[in-house]
Image: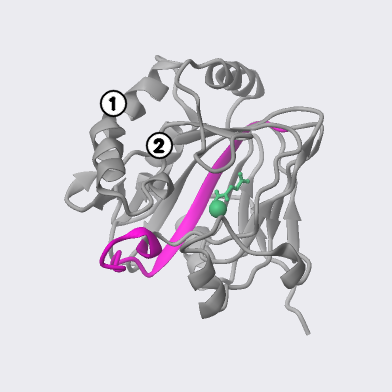
Amino acid sequence: MLKTVEIARELTEESVRGLIERTVDVIHVPGFYPKDLSAEFSDRVAGHSELEAYKVQNALKRLGMGYVDVGNDDENAARYHSAAVRSIWGIRDLVYPRMTPLDHFRLLLEEVWTPGATIQVIEGKKSFVGTCRVIEPGANMLPHNDRLARMLKDGNSGLTGQIAVNVYLDMPPEGGELELWLSEPTPEQDRIQATTDGLDRSELDAPRLIVRPANGDLVLFNSQLIHCVSPGVGGRRVTMSCFVGYRGDDKPLTYWS
Ligand SMILES: O=C(O)CCC(=O)C(=O)O
Ligand SMILES: [Fe+2]
């Protein structure tokens, strides 16, 4: 029999550990960021001159290059790292002196996790953190999982767990839900993802858990498990996100985008 789904409503050391151990399926904190500020921040992100389309799917646009866009290319890696901290500052400036939702999250994470939390270093350099994504209505994302080691040349990140963090700033009137399969890809499915955008939905069962966050909500889930976003209807979908890396209960967490 399938176990019941476990939803935590608070960001605590236990709930974070629960995601890693898979005793918690999702952490969903409603009203994490004020609704009025979510609307203002989304407008600034969506109207930003540096908003870039993903190389492969241009209905997905983003502010801040994610490590996923490096794609094992040295020039892209150099571009990613040289812009990393400047991009963090650029996004912070959009609402300064108020806080972005991810800056608030980074502080809370440091406070709840006993050994603390810090920016992930990749190949000796600081990472960017806080990608802002704008997804146009109808855009189709493929089911996938996210695992830093798959993107590294030596295939070794030192992480034993990875969590996806999203703050939902502007949700479409319909669709745009977060779909969670609560299962890991097979080794074959993991391999497929090294060279594609994701998995064929028709080859998977139905998602086990569907989360529909409201504007301002914070959601964390285990990114090593298969997940997807359903196409939005009737409006854009704006989020701010990062990953959190885990390497043991007695080690600091790290974050990057
Ligand atoms: O936007 C979302 O709800 C999830 C996006 C995603 O795939 C991730 O955060 O890893
Ligand atoms: Fe993902």
Q: Residue at x 65, y 68 (%)?
A: 182
Q: Nearer the viewer, mark 2 or mark 1?
A: 2
Location of residue 246 by image quarter: bottom left
Q: Is residue 117 above or below residue 3?
A: above
Work out whether residue 146 or residue 52 is closer to the camera in this orientation and state it. 52
| Residue denoted by label 1 | 86
Under 8 Å from ligand 1: the CB of mark 1? no
On the rendered image, what quadrant is the C terminus found in?
top left
Residue closer to the observer: 5 or 227: 227
Question: Percent x, y for residue 7?
Answer: 67, 59
Please give the range of residues in magenta: 149-171
Give percent across and percent down for residue 65: 40, 36
Q: Amino acid at mark 1?
A: Arg
- Mark number, residue 252: none
Q: Amino acid at mark 2?
A: Met
Indicate the quadrant where residue 155 lies: bottom left
Q: Which class describes the residues within 10 Å of circle 2: few (<14), some (14-19), or many (20+)?
A: many
Residue 222 appears at what percent x and percent y? 54, 61
Circle 2: element type: loop
Q: Are marks 2 and 1 in contact (CB under 8 Å)?
A: no
Q: On the picture, is 163 further left or further right than 173?
A: left
**In front of the other: 241 or 234:** 234
Residue for badge 2? 65
Q: Residue furthest left?
A: 124
Q: Residue at x 36, y 21 (%)?
A: 90
Name the element at disc 1: helix
The answer to whether residue 82 shows anywhere in this view is yes
